[in-house]
Amino acid sequence: VRSNNKYKSVHYRVVTNKHQPRVSLAMFYGPNEDTIIDPIEDLVDKGHSPLYRSYRCAEFINEFHKQEGTR
């Protein structure tokens, strides 16, 4: 949503070796429930309309929980 589909996620592959153990860190980001999530203004212009509507973080979380176990 934030990148308005301009940037795609990279394919990620772990490369390990037999000399050192692999270390993983989980990082979580949780904005306030009232935070508005929408495309970044600099990535929206006449040639690139917003592909997503603005919504509150709480709305996203509620929708996420409604869909749990359905996919």
Image (cartoon, rainbow, N blue to C red):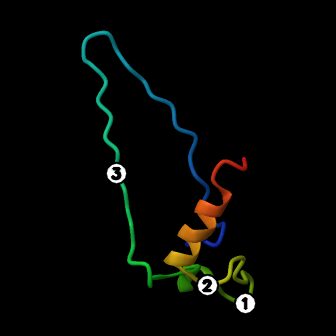
Percent across and percent down for residue 57 are 50, 76
Percent across and percent down for residue 7 are 60, 61
Q: Earlier in the sequence, mark 2 or mark 1?
A: 1
Quote the CA–CA distance across marks 2 and 1. Answer: 18 Å
Percent across and percent down for residue 44 are 63, 84
Q: What amino acid type should be assigned to the residue bearing mark 2?
A: Ser
Disc 2 marks which residue? 54
Q: Residues within 10 Å of mark 3 (few under 14, many from 20)?
A: few
Residue 64: quadrant of the picture: bottom right
Quote the CA–CA distance across marks 3 and 1. Answer: 35 Å
Residue drawn at (67%, 83%) of the image: 53
User: Disc 3 vs disc 1: Cβ atoms closer than 8 Å?
Assistant: no
Q: What amino acid type should be assigned to the residue bearing mark 1?
A: Lys
Element type where label 2 sits in the image: loop
Q: In the rendered structure, find residue 46 and report the number of the disc placed on it.
A: 1
User: Disc 2 vs disc 1: Cβ atoms closer than 8 Å?
Assistant: no
User: Disc 2 vs disc 3: Cβ atoms closer than 8 Å?
Assistant: no
Q: Residues within 10 Å of mark 2 (few under 14, many from 20)?
A: few
**Is 42 situated above or below 24?**
below
Disc 3 marks which residue? 27
Residue drawn at (37%, 56%) of the image: 28
Q: Earlier in the sequence, mark 3 or mark 1?
A: 3
Between 35 and 33, which is closer to the camera in this rendering?
33
Quote the CA–CA distance across marks 2 and 3. Answer: 25 Å
Percent across and percent down for residue 35 are 44, 82
Locate the N terminus and report the quarter of the image it occupies.
bottom right
Q: What amino acid type should be assigned to the residue bearing mark 3?
A: Met
